[in-house]
Image (cartoon, coloured by chain):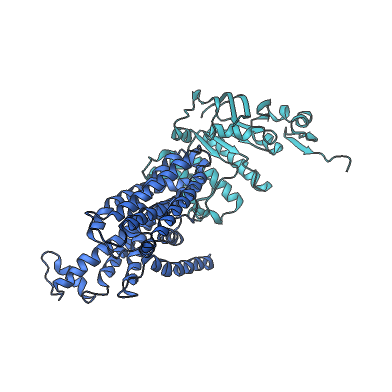
């Protein structure tokens, strides 16, 4: 269980500002969903936490600033699931998930029995044990998404970052993947940050939404607070109806232009 | 299990390599003589001293050298394919081949057709330093573009350095066209003049290079998911890449120094191993070392006897037998899956 704090996080790529003074704090076990139009800086925030881009300001886990020098420490505390992971087709599922143990294995050593046990547990938990020897290239889209999550779990990190976890999945597998993440974070007390485009799903699964626009946070709160049609019109330029279900679910329905 | 079997195959290949040759004792007498030479065992093998000298002073160093060169070229090839994430890369990628070629050409040109008696053979040294210098220049230029896209910059720098050294080499050759034949035969690779001195010369480099590469086998698996994900998994990719490239280059340069440019081994052996045993570097690297040794020892046999008494360049043999076998393997795999 760990908290994750951002203090004045700023990122620029060669002079172009992508994130401008982002502040937030997640309590342990919270699921925060970053939403916002393309280029708003959602992915950049995730990539900064994962140590893939240089940033100013600070990111802290349990009020301890992430050291920029130790890639291993970072990988033991933060697991990152990229939007389009590079999955080598001719690698077995076991070998692929084993990569998640990299931060625990000494530079030149091989995996220990403990590492193998961790992987077997993760594979069993994600219902992947029977695939262990299969080549990754023979798996379906939904199964591939599960092995990437399995690799992230093998890192045993308290913070899980998901960049567009449902982008390549059909509606059934989207639901499965998000249910899985939700179950796992409750079981393990993971603190989750995800970037998502599907606003209805984002509101449905996360504890809190942060709407980003041009590198800054412009709205934060639960789905009812953030997902309002005038807010969406202002920052996405979309004309959409927001429908409130009886159980509290907020549904965003895009509207077709009347002229056609 | 697989490692034990492959190790056994290496010993078999070495034995066959010792037994067959255009001159010397009948093939079946060689193992008998070897047994005879073990302490406390006495077998009458009927091998004369002159025949034994052929086996021990001419064939044995050649067989051992073939094994060492094959092992280090395959290991380097597999590692280069790993760090550059490109299956078509061979260990000569970053200018090893052209640098060594230039070094060797300079020696041939300076020496000309008259035979000096140098107190040390300058050819392996020139080839070795040519290779190392040209990779050093490639690395220096390639990484000075900043850290973004470093593999692409590196490969492009390798292409540029290769063109430059090749241009210089061609210029020298045109000025000294009496040595073209010698240079050409060197470029195709040869093990014919192998001595125990050559074995001693490259053994430390080959062992060092193979050990370092073997130690990186797990990290090469991590690199397969790309620079970003490997970084997010806690790997210092720049350090891994630099160490692997340096170790592979050192090994390749030492191999090139004594055997010339033996093509194809660094590509075909790792891929064959991948097709048969799977693509994890934790298996590919050790098995490439063993199968590289086997492949080159066996390829050297036809190169001795095919055009007897002349030598067939080993580079010709590796391509001639290796390419069809590889195509067959690719096809067999495709129909299987």
Residue B225 in view: no
Q: Is residue B329 left or right of residue A18?
A: left
User: Where is residue B316, by image quadrant?
Assistant: bottom left
In the rendered view, tell whether residue B194 sits above or below residue A186: below
Residue B197 percent location from the top left of the image: 23, 57
Horizontally, is A161 left or right of B36 in the view? right
Quick one: which residue is furthest to the front in this view?
B175
Q: Which chain is rendered cyan in the image?
A: A
Judge whether residue B6 can be spotted in this image.
yes
Instruction: Report the front residue among B110 and A102.
Output: B110
Q: Nearer the viewer, residue B116 or A33?
A: B116
Toward the right, the furthest residue is A259
Q: To which quarter of the image does residue B73 belong?
A: bottom left
Is residue A92 or residue B96 the one in the foreground?
B96
The vertical placement of A81 against B253, above or below, is above
Q: Who's the residue at 53% across and 54% down the image? A: A89
Residue B133 appears at what percent x and percent y?
A: 38, 46
**In this rendering, would B110 be left or right of B333?**
left
* Residue B260: % across, % down: 35, 59
**Colour used to depict chain B in the structure image:** blue
């Amino acid at each position: 269980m760990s908290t994750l704090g951002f203090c004045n996080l700023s990122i620029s790529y060669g002079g172009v500002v992508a994130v401008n003074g982002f502040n937030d704090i997640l309590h342990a076990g919270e699921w925060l969903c970053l939403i916002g139009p393309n280029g708003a800086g959602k992915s950049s925030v995730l990539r900064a936490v994962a140590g893939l881009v240089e940033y100013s300001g600070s990111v802290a886990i349990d009020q301890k600033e992430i050291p920029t020098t130790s890639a291993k420490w970072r990988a033991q505390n933060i697991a990152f699931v990229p939007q389009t992971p590079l999955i080598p087709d001719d690698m077995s599922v076991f070998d692929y998930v084993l990569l998640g143990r990299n931060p625990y294995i000494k530079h030149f050593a091989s995996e220990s029995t403990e590492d193998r046990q961790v992987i077997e547990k993760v594979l069993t938990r994600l219902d992947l044990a029977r695939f262990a020897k299969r080549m990754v290239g023979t798996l379906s889209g939904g199964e591939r998404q599960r092995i990437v999550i399995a690799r992230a779990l093998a890192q045993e990190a308290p913070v899980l970052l998901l960049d567009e976890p449902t982008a390549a999945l059909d509606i059934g597998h989207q639901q499965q993947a998000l249910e899985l993440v939700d179950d796992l974070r409750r079981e393990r007390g993971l603190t989750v940050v995800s970037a998502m485009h599907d606003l209805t799903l984002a509101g449905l699964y996360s504890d809190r939404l942060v709407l980003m626009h041009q590198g800054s946070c412009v709205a934060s709160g639960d789905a009812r607070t953030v997902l309002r049609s005038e807010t969406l019109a202002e920052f996405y330029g979309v004309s959409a109806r927001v429908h409130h279900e009886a159980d509290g679910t907020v549904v965003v329905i895009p509207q077709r232009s009347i002229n056609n | 299990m697989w490692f034990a079997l492959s190790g056994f195959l290496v010993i078999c290949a070495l034995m066959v390599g010792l037994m067959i040759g255009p001159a010397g004792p009948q093939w079946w007498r060689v193992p008998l003589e070897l047994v005879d030479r073990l302490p406390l065992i006495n077998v009458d093998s009927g091998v004369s001293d002159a025949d034994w000298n052929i086996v021990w002073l001419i064939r044995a160093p050649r067989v051992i050298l073939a094994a060492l060169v094959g092992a280090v070229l395959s290991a380097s090839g597999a590692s280069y394919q790993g760090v550059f994430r490109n299956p078509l890369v061979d260990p000569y990628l970053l200018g090893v081949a052209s640098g060594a070629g230039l070094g060797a050409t300079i020696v041939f040109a300076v020496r000309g057709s008259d035979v000096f008696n140098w107190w040390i053979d300058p050819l392996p040294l020139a080839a070795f330093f040519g290779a190392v210098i040209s990779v050093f220049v490639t690395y220096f230029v390639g990484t000075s573009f900043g850290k973004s896209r470093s593999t692409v910059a590196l490969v492009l720098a390798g292409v540029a350095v290769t063109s430059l050294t090749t241009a210089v080499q061609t210029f020298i050759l045109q000025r000294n066209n009496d040595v073209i034949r010698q240079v050409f035969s060197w470029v195709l690779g040869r093990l014919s003049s192998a001595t125990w001195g050559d074995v001693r010369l490259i053994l430390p480099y080959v062992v060092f290079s193979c050990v370092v590469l073997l130690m990186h086998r797990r990290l090469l698996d991590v690199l397969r998911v790309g620079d970003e994900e490997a970084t997010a998994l806690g790997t210092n990719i720049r350090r891994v890449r630099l160490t692997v490239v340096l170790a592979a280059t050192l090994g390749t340069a030492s191999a090139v120094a004594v055997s010339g440019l033996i093509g194809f081994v660094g590509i075909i052996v790792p891929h064959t191993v991948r097709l048969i045993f799977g693509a994890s570097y934790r298996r590919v690297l050790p098995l490439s070392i063993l199968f590289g040794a086997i492949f080159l020892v066996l390829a050297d046999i036809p190169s001795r006897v095919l055009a007897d008494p002349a030598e067939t360049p080993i580079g010709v043999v590796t391509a001639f037998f290796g390419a069809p076998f590889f195509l067959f393997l690719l096809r067999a795999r495709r129909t299987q899956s």
